[in-house]
Amino acid sequence: MRSLFWRILAAFWLALLLVAGLSILLGRALNQDAWIIARYPGLIDLAEQWTALYETQGADAAQHLLEQRRRDFSLSVQVFDESGERLVHGTYPPRPPRPHPAFDREKLPRFPWRQLSQEYTSADSDHTYLFVYRIPTRALEEWQHGSLLWPLSALGIALVILTVFSLWLTLSITGPLNRLRRAVHDLGQTTYQQDSLARLANRGDELGVLARDFNRMGARLQRLISSQRQLLRDVSHELRSPLARLRIALALAERAGPEERASMWPRLEQECDRLEALISEILALARLDADPGPASRIELLPLLERLRADAQLLAPEQHIQLQVTEGLGVEGWPDMLERALDNLLRNALRFNPAGQPLEVEASLAGEQVEIRIRDHGPGASEEHLAQLGEPFFRAPNQTSPGHGLGLAIASRAIERHNGRLYLANHPDGGFVASVELPVHRHA
């Protein structure tokens, strides 16, 4: 019973059964006629024994049994038939004399006995007999004190068991919840440790599932926080260089003459353009974490044809081969996906030699759409492949312009589409960027 649901359900039904059973037991034990007749020592099997003696040996033997019970248990008995006639003399005490009218009746003990009645039908003759018993109150109370000992003991044991089980169930819920609360507090204070919920995550119930989900969430948040901090440091570093060059150029322009100052304006404009392009890419990367709105179906063929036409304008000497399966589409945001694929295509154009074709393919692979962009350039070194796609990372031998944000923007945008970006060297030479996206089928 590893599930928390079954534990709570079992505890509820155990408590319900214990309370109901003990209530019935104690209710029967407290002054009910049937309970007393069935368990009082002087009444056990009395009706059956008397009937057998009366029908086989006569009234004298039956009367002798009643007198014996009176001596042993102070029990008074009268027996009547179906017509109300008394069958034997019985053992009722003689009626006391009526008190004088002037006597104070409140000083007399009233009904110092408990009177019970029982009907019994003989199995042999089918005659029905009415037994009327009188048990002294004091004797009945003494017997009740002893007979209620085991129900009260059962009640006490049941309450102890229920208390222990409830305590265990409560601690099994509140203990993990307190650990989760502390983990949430640590996560808010950025001091969360993933192994703090290791024992709780090993549980097989709902709290264990919650702990494992919380661990994954905490790990992802820590990665996001670390990524944001690293991004902030990288942004500060990247912005410092163009700003420093602008300050130097402005300082030189202040000291230069009119002719030299005019020659510096193109340099200032170039640095401003670089700074503007860097800020635009940083903003594009930051917008990927915002809510993009409702998604829609994106047809890949017109999208890739449009990207090929734009790329041909920038690099007319390049030959781009496009091969796309008809009717192929994905679910997502057109502007975001177009920006990601455009960055991949532009990155391939930088390294692809003019005499080699740049290959763009889109096909269906099971439940995934695979888009492959391959160039025939030098590729990337194996030691730097794992770092490609990180913000502001550029290979040491890379001389092409850029800030190292194109692949990061593409990777983040593809992840927002529930896809994956794979960057690798092609076995036959060159570099290949593979994009896998969930296929969108027509309703």
Image (cartoon, grey):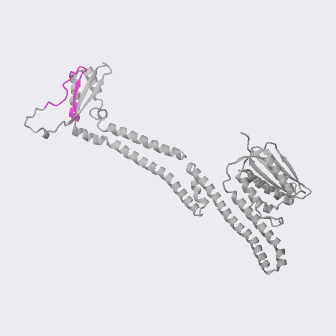
Quadrant hosting residue 23: top left
Q: Give the extent of the magenta segment.
A: 68-95
Q: Is residue 164 above or below residue 93?
A: below
Left or right for 64, reference 361 = left
Taking the spot 43% from the left edge, 47% from the top edge, the residue there is 162
User: Which residue of the protein is positioned furthest toward the right in this rendering?
Assistant: 355
Taking the spot 49% from the left edge, 45% from the top edge, the residue there is 8
Quadrant hosting residue 50: top left
Picture coordinates of residue 92 (x, y %)?
A: 18, 30
Asked whether 197 or 439 is in front, the reply is: 439
Picture coordinates of residue 374 (x, y %)?
A: 84, 54
Left or right for 51, reference 204 = left
Taking the spot 19% from the left edge, 37% from the top edge, the residue there is 112
User: Which residue of the protein is positioned furthest toward the front in this rendering?
Assistant: 258
Quadrant hosting residue 312: bottom right
Residue 120: tell me if it is visible. Answer: yes
Q: Is residue 330 above or below residue 216?
A: above
